[in-house]
Image: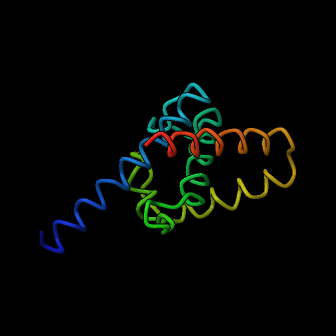
Amino acid sequence: MYLEDLIKIHKEMEMKELEVIKGIVNAYYNVDIDTKTRKREIALPRQVFFWLARNEKDDLGVKYTYHQIMDSVLPVNNHATVIHSIKLVDSLIVWDKDFKKDIELLKGIIINEKQKK
């Protein structure tokens, strides 16, 4: 197998993992974060996805890059959107205890899904 083939396989695995996280967020909030809108009921779950994706590690223990996360959601055109979203969710976690519980629950669901592999 050539190095290019290994890189391609790894990228496909990364995208599948990000799709799993996206599916969990979509199901939890009962939305489609790929919808092109700025409405809060879609934007906040999309921001949560960005935060969860950035704070998860792939199978090799490497964090997903902003560009990988950005490429996994259709309406996002700029990695600065991902960075801003992550900072916003960090702030919400500090100030909103219910929101923090939601994040912890989602992280637990993601961990369980990873263990099923």
Q: How is the image coloured?
A: rainbow
Extreme-bottom residue of the structure: 3
Tell me where residue 35 sits by quadrant: top left
In the rendered image, the quadrant that contains the C terminus is: top left
Closer-to-camera residue (53/92) = 53
In the rendered image, the quadrant that contains the N terminus is: bottom left
In this rendering, the answer to whether 12 lies above or below 63 is above
Is 99 left or right of 117, judged from the image as shown? right
Extreme-left residue of the structure: 1
Say how many tags the image has.
0
Residue 65 percent location from the top left of the image:
47, 67
In this rendering, the answer to whether 48 lies above or below 83 is above
Residue 55 percent location from the top left of the image:
60, 60
Residue 116 percent location from the top left of the image:
48, 39
Is 37 left or right of 3, judged from the image as shown? right
Is 19 left or right of 48, judged from the image as shown? left
In this rendering, the answer to whether 20 lies above or below 93 is above
Is 68 left or right of 91, judged from the image as shown? left
At horizontal 37% and vertical 56% (from top left) the residue drawn is 14
Closer-to-camera residue (37/62) = 62
Residue 2 percent location from the top left of the image:
12, 72
At horizontal 57% and vertical 40% (from top left) the residue drawn is 112
Extreme-top residue of the structure: 30
Tell me where residue 100 sits by quadrant: top right
At horizontal 36% and vertical 52% (from top left) the residue drawn is 15
